[in-house]
Every structure is written in structure tokens, then in C-alpha cells.
Image (cartoon, grey):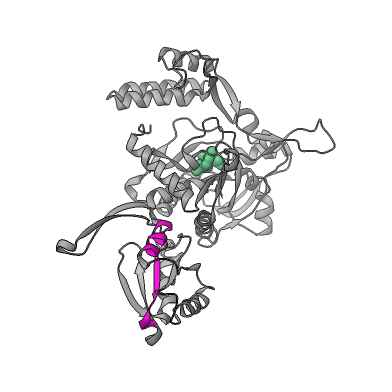
């Protein structure tokens, strides 16, 4: 159970949301019309950061593993896909309305928040008992029982303050739209709620065309859509979001080992990106999704508590078997490796699947929350000593939107031309920016705020000996070096290799 948010933690999230807007990372969607709830747009710096995170994940999957290949499946799928996957019948949240405020809530979230209150008030046993009871009722789909729990616990609406509740009912989270322009009776087409099914239905296409041998994986990055009832906490829970999923197809009986392998590998990925070990934890699911045999979340400690950023699921042969049954197309693999027990090939089977599924937006939020730093800097000595506050984004250089900013010290004496020369010589390698307005200190501040790891200053000495100073974002130290050394120096710091070597 996550701990309740303290005022200081909410203030920190507010600062991050404001920072993300002001410096071009994340904007509310259609803001000029007062926004659309739980939908967000990424700005010029945000899209670079997000693309870097996605590229890092993609290469970590498909380049570092010879047995993982990628696909890019469509968002729309034949509607029977979602019957087979269980989403039409089972992808629901229990919702409840307050009759006075007319506000809608997730019934399970109301109870979980009550349990968190008990924990905060020093009665964790009561909180745990309440969570366990909720788990039991949901597993038994006893919605009347969930309503009774809300009444017994005297849970009131935070807006109206009353306990006048409707019955609890299941609400399907899939968005649908009209699929056919000519047949108005045609079944609705869903906007996919997970990217995984695009992988399952292509299992044999990929296996045959890429000549993959089990064990192998199929990776995909793409949009997913869920009509979330509780849409809060900025980009943590969105209605339109992006997933980075990998389905790893294995021989039945080996799924336990692969589950452990991927669980450890995925945690290493987050640590290699700079999320500290003490802010990451595993959380085993108490209530398993309809497809899962075992499931664990990797949680990150956001300003609003430990919350899921990635799920690792052992999905057995559930999805492929369901698709096989509904489509009447065999989803089998012929394994000609020899079974040591019989000395014969393992033969035909429906593979088991271990899935890793991380939200690109949640990884983005975790990255920016971790990077957001405020520090007090002391400058000068004795009476001349001053202190000031500095805010900066301590992003891993590999994912920073801009890798280096080039500053001509003054806008004359050939310095702007030299800065342009450096820009032109490095632009094939790195995303750079030239900044020539304001005092150097202000320019450093602007780059700190968007997480640029290096600032290169072109000064009088540059014109004489082709050297520049390079200022490090984190230490604020300046090093003088030849222009010819910049490519190697920046390249080493920002390379994906530095992340990959830790995996
Ligand atoms: N295919 C399995 C699957 O979709 P999930 O736990 O429902 O599993 C996987 O989702 C990941 O997708 C989550 O760990 C989270 O990072 C991301 N995610 C899910 N719902 C989201 C939402 N409404 N907004 C943003 N990210 C979401």
C-alpha cells in the first residue's frame, strides 16, 4: 500500500508540473480550451527526452539481445482480438457515484485511501485487514459487498462530505469507435488498451519471417488508451499513453526462470538510467489480472509515494490459446530441440509468455521527478560570500534533450562565428544549441533548468588557441580543452553505451 501524500510532497509535484510546462516538457492537451482531463502533450524538450527514453529501451531490447526483434502493430485491431484477450468481459474498474456531488470514484480507490489513513494514524493492521477484505470482495466480484464496505467504513465523498452512494458497478475501460463507414450495425472498433495483443496476433508472422527460435522476444512501443475513472497525478495516469512492451516466448516449464531473469534485468535498466536503488522496489500482485499466473510491479518512489512504473507478468499460454480458439488458427511452435528426458524433440506446443511492460510516460515522470534538484550554492569568500538557490535537472546525459549549449562570450570579435563553426562541426553527432543573449550566468541557469549536461564557452582565448571552456552541469566546474577534443568528451558522456554497460 502506498503511503498518503504529505503537503510537502504535493508541493514538490506542483513544482515539477509547473517546471515541465514553463520549460517546454509537458503541456495540458488543448489547454486554450481549458484542457482535456488526463491527456497531455509533450513540448520541444519533452519530446526529446521521451524519444531518448524510448530509443534507449528499444535498443536495450532489440540491439542488446540477439533473440528480441521489434514490430509496430496498428492501434485498431479486429474486435474479436479483445474478446479473446478477455478485455471485453474483464477489463473493468468498479465505480461508484456520489448522489450529492455527482462525482464518480473508483470504489476500490476509496477503500484503499481509507486503509492508507489507518496506516498513517498508526494502525497498519487495520489498514492491511481492510485491503485484504477489499481484495477478497473484488476477486469474488462481490460489488454489493464493496458498497457495504464503503458504508461500514463511513467513507464520504471528499466534495459533498456525504455518504449517499449509488451501487458499485463495473465500468469497461476500453474506448470504442465506429469501425465501418458503411455498416452502422458493425461491431465497434476499440482503441487498444495495451500494445501486447498486437504482438500476440503476430506471433507466427514474426517467428516465421524472422526465423526465430524459442526462447525469443517481440518488442513494441506504441500508444494505448484507457478510459481511466481516476485520472490524477499529472502524466501518471492518462487516458492516452504510450507503452513499451516485450513478450518473451518460452518453452512451457521454463517460464519461472525467465520471469526471474526479466524481473532482475528490468530493475537494472531503471537503475542504470539513474533511478536510485532505494527509490525502487518490487511489489508482488495480490490480485492477478485475468491473464496472469504471476505478476510483479517495479515501483518508483514518486513525490506522491511508491507507484508502479513497470509490470512483469507471467502470462502462461493464455493469450495464444485464446487467439487459437477464437480464430481457429493454430498458434503452435515446433521445437526440434531434444528433450533430455525422452531423447526426442519437444515437438509442437503453444509457447508460454513472460511479458515486460513499462509506460513511457511513467518512466518520463520518474526520470524528471528524480532529476529535479534544488540546491543552495555558496560563492566567494569572507564578506563577499553570497548564497543563492539553484534549480536544475540532473538528467542522465544520455537522455538529456540537448547535449551541449555553445555560448559566444560576447556578440562580436568573431566569437559568434566561432560558435557557429563548433555547432556545424558537431551537429551530426549531437543535439546542440547556440545561446548568445544575456550574461553567461543567466545562460548557464537556462541550460541547467532543462538539464543540458555541458555548456561550451567561446572566449578571447578561443580565437587565439582554439580552446574552449566546458562547464559541467552537476559540478559547475569548468575545464579548458581543445575544440578538437569536444566530440570525444561529449560523446563519451552522452553515449547509450554507458547505460548499456550496466545492464
Ligand atoms: N500488457 C500488460 C499491461 O498493459 P498494465 O500493468 O496494465 O499491464 C503496464 O500496464 C504499464 O503501462 C504500467 O506499468 C504503466 O507504466 C503503464 N500504464 C498503464 N496504464 C496507464 C495509464 N493510464 N497512464 C499511463 N501509463 C499507464
Res 195 seen here? no
- Rendered location of residue 364, percent (x, y): 47, 50
Tell me which residue sits at (64%, 53%) in the image: 72
Q: Is residue 125 left or right of residue 58?
A: left
- Rendered location of residue 375, percent (x, y): 29, 53
Tell me which residue sits at (46%, 68%) in the image: 435
Q: Quadrant of the N terminus?
A: top left
Is 311 placed above or below 142 here? below
Magenta region includes residue 447: yes
Which image quarter: residue 184?
A: top right
In the image, 134 versus 380, the foreground residue is 380
In the image, 110 versus 401, the foreground residue is 401
Residue found at the very far bottom of the displayed protein: 464
Tell me which residue sits at (59%, 40%) in the image: 317
Magenta region includes residue 22: no
- Rendered location of residue 482, percent (x, y): 38, 81
Q: Which contiguous range is marked in magenta?
A: 442-462
Which image quarter: residue 112?
A: top left
Q: Is residue 33 left or right of residue 275?
A: right
- Rendered location of residue 247, percent (x, y): 56, 48
Residue found at the very far right of the displayed protein: 182
Q: Is residue 388 left or right of residue 211?
A: left
Q: Quadrant of the C terminus?
A: bottom left
Res 133 seen here? yes
In the image, 357 versus 69, the foreground residue is 357
Is 447 placed above or below 251 here? below
| Total marks in image | 0
Amino acid at each position: 500500500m502506498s503511503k498518503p501524500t504529505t503537503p510537502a510532497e504535493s508541493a514538490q509535484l506542483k513544482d515539477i508540473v509547473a517546471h515541465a510546462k514553463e520549460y517546454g516538457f509537458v503541456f495540458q492537451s488543448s489547454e486554450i480550451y481549458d484542457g482535456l482531463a488526463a491527456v497531455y502533450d509533450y513540448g520541444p524538450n519533452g519530446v526529446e527526452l521521451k524519444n531518448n527514453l524510448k530509443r534507449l529501451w528499444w535498443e536495450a531490447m532489440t540491439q542488446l539481445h540477439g533473440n528480441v526483434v521489434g514490430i509496430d502493430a496498428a492501434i485498431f485491431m479486429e474486435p474479436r482480438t479483445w474478446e479473446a484477450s478477455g478485455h471485453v468481459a474483464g477489463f473493468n474498474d468498479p465505480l461508484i457515484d456520489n448522489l450529492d456531488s455527482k462525482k464518480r470514484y473508483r470504489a476500490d480507490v476509496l477503500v484503499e485511501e481509507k486503509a492508507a489513513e489507518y496506516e498513517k494514524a498508526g494502525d497498519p493492521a487495520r489498514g492491511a485487514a481492510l485491503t485484504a477484505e477489499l481484495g477478497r470482495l473484488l476477486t469474488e466480484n462481490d460489488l454489493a459487498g464493496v458498497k457495504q464496505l464503503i458504508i461500514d467504513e463511513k467513507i464520504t465523498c471528499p466534495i459533498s462530505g456525504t455518504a449517499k452512494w449509488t451501487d458499485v458497478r463495473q465500468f469497461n475501460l476500453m474506448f470504442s469507435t465506429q469501425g465501418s463507414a458503411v455498416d452502422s450495425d458493425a461491431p465497434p472498433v476499440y482503441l487498444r488498451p495495451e500494445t501486447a495483443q498486437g504482438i500476440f496476433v503476430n506471433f507466427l508472422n514474426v517467428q516465421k519471417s524472422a526465423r526465430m527460435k524459442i526462447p525469443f522476444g517481440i518488442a513494441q512501443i506504441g500508444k494505448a488508451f484507457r478510459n481511466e475513472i481516476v485520472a490524477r497525478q499529472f502524466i501518471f495516469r492518462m487516458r492516452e499513453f504510450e507503452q513499451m512492451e516485450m513478450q518473451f516466448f518460452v518453452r512451457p516449464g521454463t517460464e519461472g526462470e525467465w520471469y526471474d531473469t526479466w524481473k532482475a534485468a528490468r530493475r537494472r535498466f531503471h537503475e542504470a538510467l539513474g533511478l536510485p536503488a532505494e527509490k525502487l522496489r518490487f511489489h508482488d500482485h495480490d490480485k492477478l489480472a485475468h491473464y496472469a499466473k504471476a505478476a510483479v510491479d517495479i515501483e518508483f518512489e514518486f513525490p506522491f509515494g511508491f507507484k508502479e512504473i513497470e509490470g512483469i507478468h507471467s502470462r502462461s499460454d493464455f493469450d495464444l490459446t485464446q487467439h487459437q480458439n477464437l480464430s481457429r488458427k493454430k498458434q503452435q511452435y515446433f521445437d526440434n530441440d531434444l528433450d533430455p528426458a525422452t531423447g526426442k524433440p519437444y515437438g509442437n506446443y503453444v509457447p508460454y509468455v513472460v511479458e515486460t511492460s513499462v509506460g513511457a510516460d511513467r518512466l518520463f515522470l520518474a526520470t524528471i521527478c528524480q532529476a529535479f534538484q534544488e540546491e543552495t550554492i555558496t560563492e566567494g569568500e569572507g564578506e563577499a560570500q553570497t548564497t543563492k538557490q539553484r534549480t536544475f535537472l540532473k538528467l542522465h546525459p544520455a537522455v538529456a534533450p540537448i547535449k551541449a549549449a555553445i555560448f559566444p562570450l560576447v556578440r562580436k570579435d568573431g566569437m559568434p562565428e566561432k560558435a557557429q563553426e563548433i555547432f556545424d562541426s558537431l551537429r551530426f553527432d549531437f543535439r546542440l544549441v547556440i545561446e548568445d543573449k544575456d550574461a553567461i550566468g543567466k545562460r548557464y541557469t537556462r541550460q541547467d533548468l532543462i538539464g543540458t549536461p555541458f555548456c561550451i564557452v567561446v572566449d578571447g582565448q578561443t580565437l587565439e588557441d582554439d580552446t574552449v571552456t566546458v562547464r559541467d552541469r552537476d559540478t559547475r566546474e569548468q575545464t579548458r580543452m581543445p575544440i578538437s577534443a569536444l566530440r570525444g568528451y561529449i560523446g563519451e558522456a552522452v553515449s547509450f553505451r554507458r547505460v548499456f554497460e550496466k545492464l
